[in-house]
Image (spheres, helix red, strand yellow):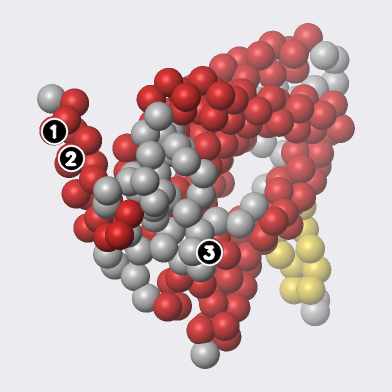
Amino acid sequence: MTEYILNLDTEIFLWLNSFHALYWDVFMKMSTSKIIWVPMYVALVIALWRTGGWRTMVVMVVGAALAVTLADQVTASLLRPMFERLRPANLDNPISAMVHIVNDYRGGRYGFPSCHAANTFAVVSLMSLFFYRWRFTLFIIMWALLNCYSRLYLGVHYPGDLIAGILVGSICGGVVFLVASAVMNYWKGCKKPGYIPPKRKLTINGRIIYYRPLDWVLWIGFLTVFSIALCSGALFK
Protein backbone atom coordinates (compact mmCIF):
# COMPACT_ATOMS: atom_id res chain seq x y z
CA MET A 1 0.00 0.00 0.00
CA THR A 2 2.81 2.39 0.91
CA GLU A 3 4.64 1.59 -2.32
CA TYR A 4 1.46 2.22 -4.32
CA ILE A 5 0.98 5.64 -2.68
CA LEU A 6 4.61 6.60 -3.30
CA ASN A 7 4.40 5.54 -6.95
CA LEU A 8 1.16 7.46 -7.41
CA ASP A 9 2.73 10.50 -5.77
CA THR A 10 5.68 10.24 -8.18
CA GLU A 11 3.43 9.91 -11.23
CA ILE A 12 1.34 12.93 -10.23
CA PHE A 13 4.51 14.93 -9.60
CA LEU A 14 6.03 14.08 -13.00
CA TRP A 15 2.77 14.94 -14.74
CA LEU A 16 2.42 18.33 -13.03
CA ASN A 17 6.13 19.12 -13.31
CA SER A 18 6.01 18.48 -17.07
CA PHE A 19 3.94 21.63 -17.64
CA HIS A 20 6.52 24.37 -17.87
CA ALA A 21 7.65 27.32 -19.99
CA LEU A 22 10.44 29.90 -19.81
CA TYR A 23 8.06 32.59 -18.55
CA TRP A 24 6.83 30.40 -15.71
CA ASP A 25 10.40 29.39 -14.86
CA VAL A 26 11.09 33.02 -13.97
CA PHE A 27 7.69 33.57 -12.34
CA MET A 28 7.91 30.54 -10.04
CA LYS A 29 11.54 31.18 -9.11
CA MET A 30 10.59 34.70 -8.00
CA SER A 31 7.42 33.54 -6.26
CA THR A 32 9.26 31.04 -4.09
CA SER A 33 11.62 33.73 -2.78
CA LYS A 34 10.94 34.87 0.79
CA ILE A 35 12.36 38.35 0.28
CA ILE A 36 9.89 39.39 -2.39
CA TRP A 37 6.99 39.00 0.06
CA VAL A 38 8.53 41.28 2.73
CA PRO A 39 6.26 44.26 1.83
CA MET A 40 3.20 42.05 2.39
CA TYR A 41 4.59 40.87 5.74
CA VAL A 42 5.15 44.48 6.80
CA ALA A 43 1.59 45.34 5.77
CA LEU A 44 0.32 42.44 7.87
CA VAL A 45 2.21 43.65 10.95
CA ILE A 46 0.82 47.16 10.45
CA ALA A 47 -2.70 45.72 10.02
CA LEU A 48 -2.30 43.86 13.33
CA TRP A 49 -1.24 47.08 15.03
CA ARG A 50 -4.01 49.21 13.52
CA THR A 51 -6.59 46.49 14.19
CA GLY A 52 -5.79 45.46 17.75
CA GLY A 53 -3.19 47.86 19.12
CA TRP A 54 0.48 47.31 19.90
CA ARG A 55 -0.15 44.61 22.54
CA THR A 56 -2.12 42.45 20.13
CA MET A 57 0.49 43.07 17.46
CA VAL A 58 3.29 41.89 19.76
CA VAL A 59 1.40 38.73 20.74
CA MET A 60 0.59 37.82 17.14
CA VAL A 61 4.03 38.63 15.72
CA VAL A 62 5.70 36.57 18.44
CA GLY A 63 3.08 33.88 17.84
CA ALA A 64 3.80 33.85 14.10
CA ALA A 65 7.54 33.55 14.72
CA LEU A 66 6.90 30.72 17.19
CA ALA A 67 4.51 28.91 14.80
CA VAL A 68 6.97 29.11 11.90
CA THR A 69 9.88 28.00 14.09
CA LEU A 70 7.87 25.09 15.46
CA ALA A 71 6.69 24.01 11.99
CA ASP A 72 10.19 24.35 10.57
CA GLN A 73 11.82 22.32 13.34
CA VAL A 74 9.20 19.56 13.24
CA THR A 75 9.65 19.15 9.48
CA ALA A 76 13.40 19.74 9.13
CA SER A 77 14.77 18.32 12.38
CA LEU A 78 12.26 15.60 13.28
CA LEU A 79 10.39 14.24 10.26
CA ARG A 80 12.92 14.58 7.44
CA PRO A 81 15.67 12.57 9.20
CA MET A 82 13.00 10.01 10.10
CA PHE A 83 11.64 9.43 6.56
CA GLU A 84 14.74 10.37 4.49
CA ARG A 85 12.77 10.80 1.28
CA LEU A 86 14.97 12.21 -1.47
CA ARG A 87 13.82 15.31 -3.28
CA PRO A 88 12.73 14.63 -6.89
CA ALA A 89 15.55 16.80 -8.28
CA ASN A 90 18.24 15.26 -6.09
CA LEU A 91 20.87 13.62 -8.28
CA ASP A 92 20.72 10.42 -6.22
CA ASN A 93 17.01 10.07 -7.02
CA PRO A 94 16.40 7.70 -10.00
CA ILE A 95 13.80 10.08 -11.48
CA SER A 96 16.02 13.20 -11.32
CA ALA A 97 16.79 13.03 -15.05
CA MET A 98 13.06 13.37 -15.80
CA VAL A 99 12.53 16.36 -13.50
CA HIS A 100 12.30 19.90 -14.84
CA ILE A 101 14.51 22.19 -12.75
CA VAL A 102 15.29 25.92 -13.01
CA ASN A 103 18.80 27.40 -12.92
CA ASP A 104 20.15 24.10 -11.59
CA TYR A 105 18.29 24.63 -8.29
CA ARG A 106 17.78 21.28 -6.57
CA GLY A 107 17.33 22.15 -2.89
CA GLY A 108 18.70 20.03 -0.06
CA ARG A 109 18.84 16.24 0.11
CA TYR A 110 15.52 15.35 1.76
CA GLY A 111 12.13 16.96 1.14
CA PHE A 112 9.43 15.19 3.17
CA PRO A 113 7.62 17.13 4.55
CA SER A 114 8.02 20.49 2.82
CA CYS A 115 9.31 23.25 5.09
CA HIS A 116 7.94 25.89 2.70
CA ALA A 117 4.45 24.42 2.94
CA ALA A 118 4.67 23.98 6.72
CA ASN A 119 5.94 27.51 7.35
CA THR A 120 3.44 29.28 5.10
CA PHE A 121 0.45 27.34 6.41
CA ALA A 122 1.54 27.93 10.00
CA VAL A 123 1.10 31.64 9.27
CA VAL A 124 -2.10 31.03 7.30
CA SER A 125 -3.84 29.10 10.08
CA LEU A 126 -2.71 31.51 12.81
CA MET A 127 -3.76 34.70 11.01
CA SER A 128 -6.99 33.27 9.59
CA LEU A 129 -8.13 32.21 13.04
CA PHE A 130 -7.38 35.66 14.40
CA PHE A 131 -8.96 37.88 11.75
CA TYR A 132 -12.15 35.95 10.77
CA ARG A 133 -12.31 37.79 7.42
CA TRP A 134 -13.24 35.56 4.49
CA ARG A 135 -11.55 37.74 1.85
CA PHE A 136 -8.31 37.76 3.79
CA THR A 137 -8.52 34.03 4.49
CA LEU A 138 -9.15 33.25 0.82
CA PHE A 139 -6.27 35.47 -0.30
CA ILE A 140 -3.73 34.15 2.20
CA ILE A 141 -4.63 30.54 1.38
CA MET A 142 -4.15 31.27 -2.34
CA TRP A 143 -0.81 32.91 -1.51
CA ALA A 144 0.31 29.84 0.43
CA LEU A 145 -0.83 27.49 -2.35
CA LEU A 146 1.16 29.53 -4.88
CA ASN A 147 4.24 29.07 -2.69
CA CYS A 148 3.54 25.34 -2.48
CA TYR A 149 3.01 24.93 -6.22
CA SER A 150 6.21 26.82 -6.96
CA ARG A 151 8.13 24.14 -5.05
CA LEU A 152 6.57 21.41 -7.17
CA TYR A 153 7.16 23.39 -10.36
CA LEU A 154 10.84 23.84 -9.48
CA GLY A 155 11.14 20.09 -8.98
CA VAL A 156 12.14 20.08 -5.32
CA HIS A 157 8.98 18.59 -3.76
CA TYR A 158 6.44 15.85 -4.44
CA PRO A 159 2.72 16.61 -3.89
CA GLY A 160 2.89 14.35 -0.81
CA ASP A 161 5.68 16.50 0.64
CA LEU A 162 3.46 19.55 0.29
CA ILE A 163 0.34 17.91 1.74
CA ALA A 164 2.30 16.69 4.76
CA GLY A 165 3.83 20.15 5.20
CA ILE A 166 0.40 21.78 5.01
CA LEU A 167 -0.91 19.47 7.76
CA VAL A 168 2.10 20.07 10.02
CA GLY A 169 1.97 23.85 9.51
CA SER A 170 -1.79 24.06 10.08
CA ILE A 171 -1.53 22.10 13.31
CA CYS A 172 1.39 24.22 14.57
CA GLY A 173 -0.45 27.43 13.71
CA GLY A 174 -3.61 26.19 15.43
CA VAL A 175 -1.75 25.21 18.61
CA VAL A 176 0.07 28.56 18.78
CA PHE A 177 -3.24 30.35 18.19
CA LEU A 178 -4.70 28.72 21.30
CA VAL A 179 -1.69 29.90 23.32
CA ALA A 180 -1.85 33.40 21.81
CA SER A 181 -5.59 33.61 22.54
CA ALA A 182 -4.98 32.72 26.18
CA VAL A 183 -2.33 35.43 26.44
CA MET A 184 -4.62 38.02 24.83
CA ASN A 185 -7.45 37.08 27.19
CA TYR A 186 -5.29 37.84 30.23
CA TRP A 187 -3.30 40.80 28.92
CA LYS A 188 -5.40 43.90 29.44
CA GLY A 189 -5.74 46.00 26.31
CA CYS A 190 -5.45 43.17 23.79
CA LYS A 191 -8.20 42.75 21.23
CA LYS A 192 -9.84 39.36 21.07
CA PRO A 193 -9.74 37.19 17.92
CA GLY A 194 -12.50 38.10 15.50
CA TYR A 195 -12.49 41.80 16.40
CA ILE A 196 -13.52 43.89 13.37
CA PRO A 197 -12.19 47.46 13.46
CA PRO A 198 -14.37 50.29 12.14
CA LYS A 199 -13.88 51.34 8.55
CA ARG A 200 -11.45 54.15 7.87
CA LYS A 201 -11.68 56.58 5.00
CA LEU A 202 -9.08 57.76 2.54
CA THR A 203 -9.66 60.80 0.33
CA ILE A 204 -8.06 60.73 -3.13
CA ASN A 205 -8.81 63.61 -5.51
CA GLY A 206 -11.95 64.40 -3.56
CA ARG A 207 -13.17 60.81 -3.72
CA ILE A 208 -13.67 59.00 -0.42
CA ILE A 209 -12.55 55.37 -0.25
CA TYR A 210 -13.53 53.30 2.79
CA TYR A 211 -11.20 50.53 3.90
CA ARG A 212 -10.05 48.46 6.86
CA PRO A 213 -6.34 48.05 7.79
CA LEU A 214 -6.44 44.43 6.67
CA ASP A 215 -7.30 45.51 3.12
CA TRP A 216 -3.74 46.82 2.72
CA VAL A 217 -2.42 43.29 3.02
CA LEU A 218 -4.58 42.18 0.10
CA TRP A 219 -3.69 45.20 -2.03
CA ILE A 220 0.04 44.86 -1.47
CA GLY A 221 -0.17 41.09 -1.96
CA PHE A 222 -1.94 41.47 -5.30
CA LEU A 223 0.51 44.22 -6.29
CA THR A 224 3.41 41.88 -5.50
CA VAL A 225 1.96 39.14 -7.71
CA PHE A 226 1.38 41.69 -10.48
CA SER A 227 4.97 42.91 -10.13
CA ILE A 228 6.29 39.34 -10.34
CA ALA A 229 4.24 38.82 -13.50
CA LEU A 230 5.60 42.01 -15.08
CA CYS A 231 9.20 41.27 -14.11
CA SER A 232 8.88 37.72 -15.40
CA GLY A 233 7.67 39.04 -18.74
CA ALA A 234 10.52 41.57 -18.93
CA LEU A 235 13.21 39.01 -18.03
CA PHE A 236 11.69 36.45 -20.37
CA LYS A 237 12.03 38.86 -23.28
Going by the image, does 216 lie left or right of 229? right
Distance between mark 1 and mark 3 Cα atoms: 31 Å
- Looking at the rendered image, the quarter that the N terminus falls into is top left
Q: Are marks 1 and 3 in contact (CB under 8 Å)?
A: no
Residue found at x 61% / y 73%: 227
Q: Is 230 situated above or below 71?
A: below
Residue 196 appears in the picture as rendered = yes
Distance between mark 2 and mark 1 Cα atoms: 5 Å
Q: Are marks 2 and 1 in contact (CB under 8 Å)?
A: yes
Please tell me which of labels 3 and 2 falls first in the chain. Answer: 2
Query: In the rendered structure, which amino acid carries the disc numbered 1?
Result: Tyr
Query: In the rendered structure, which amino acid carries the disc numbered 3?
Result: Lys
Going by the image, does 111 lie left or right of 52? left
Q: Which mark is residue 112?
A: none
Going by the image, does 128 lie left or right of 54? left
For label 2, the residue is 7
Pointer 1 local density, CA inside 10 Å: few below 14, some 14–19, many at least 20: few
Question: Which quadrant would residue 98 be assigned to in this image?
Answer: bottom left
For label 1, the residue is 4
For label 3, the residue is 29
Distance between mark 3 and mark 2 Cα atoms: 27 Å
Pointer 2 local density, CA inside 10 Å: few below 14, some 14–19, many at least 20: few
Closer to viewer: mark 3 or mark 2: 2
- Spot the residue most to the front: 92
Q: For mark 1, give the secondary structure.
A: helix
Residue found at x 57% / y 85%: 234
Q: For mark 3, give the secondary structure.
A: helix
Q: Position of residue 170 (x, y in %)?
A: 49, 28
